[in-house]
Image (cartoon, coloured by chain):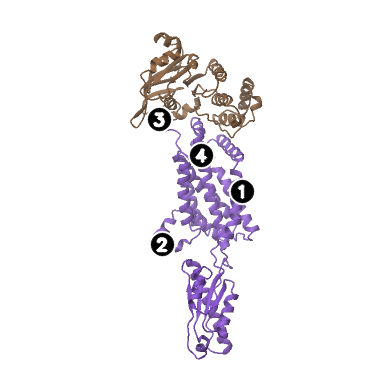
Chain colours: A brown, B purple
Amino acid sequence: MNKETVLSVKDLTKRFGNFTAVDRITFQVMKGEIFGFLGANGAGKTTAMRMLCGLSYPTSGSGTVAGYDIVRQAEEIKRHIGYMSQRFSLYEGLTVWENLRLFATIYGMPARQIRERSDEVFGALGMKDMRNALVKDIPLGWKQRLAFTAATLHSPDIVFLDEPTGGVDPATRRKFWEMIYKASSEGMTVFVTTHYLDEAEYCNRISIMVDGQIKALDTPAGLKEEYHATTMDEVFRTVARNAKRPG
Amino acid sequence: MNARTLTALLRKELLMMKRNPIVPRLIVAMPVLVMLIIPLVATLDVKDVGVAVVDNDRTELSRRMVADMEASEYLHITGCYARHDEALRQMENGRADVIVSIPEDYQKDWTSGKKPRLAVEANGVDAMKGTLGAQYAARAAARSLTQWQAERGIGLPAAESNTMNLYNPTLNFRNYMIPALMVVLLIIVCGFLPTLNLVGEKEAGTIEAMNVTPVGKLEFVLSKLIPYWAVGLLIVTVGMLIGWLVYGLVPEGSVGSIYLAAILFSLVMSGLGVAIANRSATILQSIFVMFAFIVVFQLMGGLFTPIASMPRWAQGITYALPPRYFIEIMRAVYLKGATPADLAVQYVALAGFALLLSLAAAATYRRRD
């Protein structure tokens, strides 16, 4: 392997009482990679991601994210990652610009750099005239792109996206993925959960989680070959066939 | 402690508060309404006590007693009846609170050196009005008798004692209520707003967006507490202005000592609010818990009923209630002109609670589960 690892976990487990949400998962993510984290609803994707972001304590297992230990150095990890949650989570009562400024300031970006970077992003996204609109008034597709911008304005080593494109049309999803490609081409690592299987095709590598465990992990082409399938949809159905948890 | 982060968070809180459709109006309208209406309606002064008289004597003395009672600002005569059961009917249908029965030959007996007695009966359903009303009626009758005796040179004028009320010379219940109402406002506004704000962030999911950033625990909690100092001061200012403009009541002591106590108490309430919010998953949950505290604070903090007349064990509990100290400070500064030095115990207790609850607010805030 010629690329450096930005994320590496071994036997990561999270139990809630008797329920094992994440069951000894082990994998690595390389720098600049777009890593797809697939699984049916309730397979444990979000729980796993929350542990990686320092939002949740692992029950057992170990790992590093951006070079920091996920058990002991959660606060350090938070400085070097971006996170966009499944529930759209910018402040609805603030304007687009106020949200960006707030998050960038928390990440310690100098005021001038915040202005420059956000002007750049607004220009690239064609969002200039939305700058002073309240977030609650803009369409969902824009909100998602804005949330991605807020999560990446400080140029984190790795950005975690938890089902970032839920509820929007394919054209809008396509635009979102263009942003992901751009960030990745600039060297940012992207860790994305999704259950849209067409999106899985866009990833460099994907893992498929079933009942808290990673059941398959390879490039989309590799997985299709391994499961003798022509589409990711078939691969997913084959892998998830024996799932016990209701979706 | 990162000042730049804190500033950014405070700016966010202020912008959100300003744009909230209800909160800014509530902060101004609530003190205005409470201060304008409650002092007028929540009065414990007993006035307008209805007195039914059963005059079996029908002499100059008895008529004079009735006239004197009628002249009292606290009493009014509902009627003079020949029979007791007629007077009792007045009490039963709620017109009379007190029945005064003047016995037959009342004037004659006094003239001949006997000491006949009046019978005064009070309606115990409204215990306060009944007992106080009976006292007023008895006192008015006694005064008529004394005067009547003095004019005729019989009997010695009884030694009269005069009671003068210090600090609240007119014994106006409003003067007692107004400082306490500001406490009520701070309890409600500074208790509920931060709670609702923080649980609202939980429900909206924005708290998770914050928890995944490197924002410090301290900065985040302070950003939830500091705006409510400002709100607390604003409320107290509106309250004092209305007290002055509408009721002509100004603090005898310094306004600064009121502000100092208000800042400490706002911190107590918002610290409690944040701690409750940290432990609640939904707005409904947090409201129930906060409400439980507020009920105890209002009923046991000495707002409406004096702590000194509570049972011993209950008095012990009140030492653990922060509003107790704030109410004592407000009344002492407003009515007696006390200084923070005079009230050192109360200020220190409030400061202690403020510190304790702020720490609880920070300690219960979990950035990781």
Q: Which chain letter goes with mark 3?
A: A
The vertical placement of A237 against B158, above or below, is: above
Disc 2 marks which residue?
B311
Give x and y (percent) for residue B300.
46, 56
Q: Which chain letter goes with mark 1?
A: B
Q: Amino acid at mark 3?
A: Tyr
Q: Mark 1: few, some, or many residues within 10 Å (few <14, many ≥20)? A: some
Circle 4 — which element?
helix
Give x and y (percent) for residue B337.
57, 61
Disc 1 marks which residue?
B28
Residue furthest toward the left? A18
Q: Residue at x 44, y 56 (%)?
A: B318
Asked if the residue at tag 1 contacts the one at tag 4, i.e. Cβ–Cβ closer than 8 Å, the answer is no
Q: Which mark is residue A57?
A: 3
Q: Amino acid at mark 4?
A: Leu
Q: CA distance from mark 4 to mark 2?
A: 38 Å
